[in-house]
């Protein structure tokens, strides 16, 4: 006599049928999903609510990943180099991806805490700034340290640091203005203002070019409300 092979899935369904009905299962699943949605709503509410002073999250030190811990000075340097801002999530105007919410829930369960005081590193255009490509979501630990929760979006362009360099400080802007003036002066045809090219003539043309370039730089900076990276990295104001 040949015995039929046992289908484990069929046996599993029979076992489930003995204990619960399909209606019970659906109700349980709905309850779990509703509870999960409530947790996500609570997280989003904490992200949009102002919290001062910045709270301290007591993560379980044994469960923390050391490569996710950053000091505020390290975050500041990156923001200054790439012209980014480090602000509370309540100013973030883009959507927080579901993957970030899943990671927050995982961390809260693993560390048995309710994470608060969320902050994000991102370009200015991704924030709702008050008038006066690659977000990083952080939670404060204390003593100037922050724990990286999630990163999403595209990586920054390798040219961003180069474009941000002139606005890193006043000294950088002056150096760029001097270089641009020197290049513009060298493009003036020789003998345009006289038969001979003298050092004094070159110097006078250079000073004239410097005034022109500096005027354009100042006009663009004031018209666009630009400020140096060191002043805006943690400012909530558009024209800080």
Image (spheres, rainbow, N blue to C red):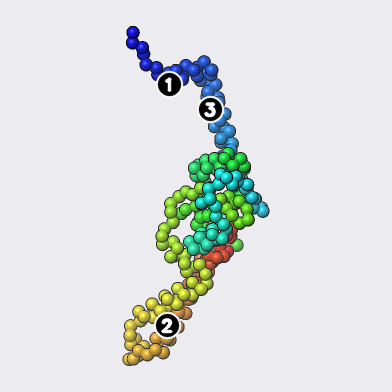
Q: Is 193 on the left or on the right of 128, as rendered?
A: left
At horizontal 47% and vertical 79% (from top left) the residue drawn is 211
Percent x, y of residue 50: 64, 50
Circle 3 or circle 1, nearest the eye? 1
**Residue under numbered circle 1:** 9
Crowdedness near tag 2: few (<14), some (14–19) or many (≥20) residues, C-alpha within 10 Å: many
Report how many numbered discs are placed on residues in the image: 3
Residue 206: give its label: 2
Q: Earlier in the sequence, mark 1 or mark 2?
A: 1
Q: Residue 36: percent from the left, percent from the top? A: 56, 35
On the rendered image, what quadrant is the C terminus found in? bottom right
Question: Pointer 3: residues within 10 angstroms few (<14), some, or many (20+)?
Answer: few
Q: Classify mark 1: helix, strand or loop.
A: helix
Residue drawn where x is 59% and y is 42% of the image: 111
Q: Is residue 60 above or below residue 226?
A: above
Mark 1 crowdedness (10 Å alpha carbons): few <14, some 14-19, many ≥20: few
Spatial CA span between label 2 and label 3: 75 Å
Q: Secondary structure at mark 2?
A: helix
The residue lying toward the viewer, choosing from 28 and 141, is 141
User: Among all residues in the image, which is located at the extreme right?
Assistant: 53
Q: Which mark is residue 29?
A: 3
Residue 134 in view, yes or no = yes
Q: Earlier in the sequence, mark 2 or mark 3?
A: 3
Q: Position of residue 164 (x, y in %)?
A: 47, 65
Q: What mark, if any, has residue 135 been given in the picture?
A: none
Front residue of 111/187: it is: 111
The residue depicted at 51 percent of the width and 51 percent of the height is 67
Residue at figure coordinates x 51%, y 47% from the top left = 150
Which comes before the other along the chain, label 3 or label 1?
Answer: 1
| Cα–Cα gap, marks 3 and 1 | 20 Å
Which label lies toward us, 2 or 3?
3
Relative to 62, residue 128 above or below? below
């Amino acid at each position: 006599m040949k015995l039929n092979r046992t289908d484990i899935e069929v046996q599993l369904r029979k076992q489930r049928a003995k204990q619960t009905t399909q209606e019970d299962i659906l109700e349980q699943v709905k309850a779990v999903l509703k509870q999960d949605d409530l947790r996500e709503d609570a997280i989003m509410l904490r992200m949009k609510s102002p919290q001062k002073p910045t709270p301290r999250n007591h993560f379980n030190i044994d469960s923390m990943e050391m490569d996710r811990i950053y000091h505020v000075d390290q975050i500041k340097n990156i923001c200054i180099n790439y012209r980014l801002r480090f602000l509370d999530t309540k100013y973030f105007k883009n959507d927080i991806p579901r993957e970030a919410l899943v990671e927050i829930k995982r961390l809260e369960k693993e560390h048995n805490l309710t994470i608060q005081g969320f902050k994000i590193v991102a370009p200015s255009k991704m924030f709702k700034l008050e008038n006066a490509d690659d977000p990083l979501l952080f939670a404060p630990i204390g003593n100037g340290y922050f724990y990286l929760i999630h990163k999403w979006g595209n990586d920054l362009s390798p040219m961003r640091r180069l474009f941000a360099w002139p606005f890193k400080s006043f000294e950088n802007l002056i150096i760029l203005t001097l270089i641009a003036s020197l290049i513009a002066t060298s493009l003036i045809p020789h003998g345009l203002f006289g038969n001979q090219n003298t050092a004094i003539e070159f110097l006078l043309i250079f000073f004239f070019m410097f005034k022109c370039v500096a005027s354009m730089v100042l006009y663009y900076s004031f018209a666009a409300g630009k400020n140096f990276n060191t002043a805006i990295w943690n400012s909530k104001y558009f024209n800080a």
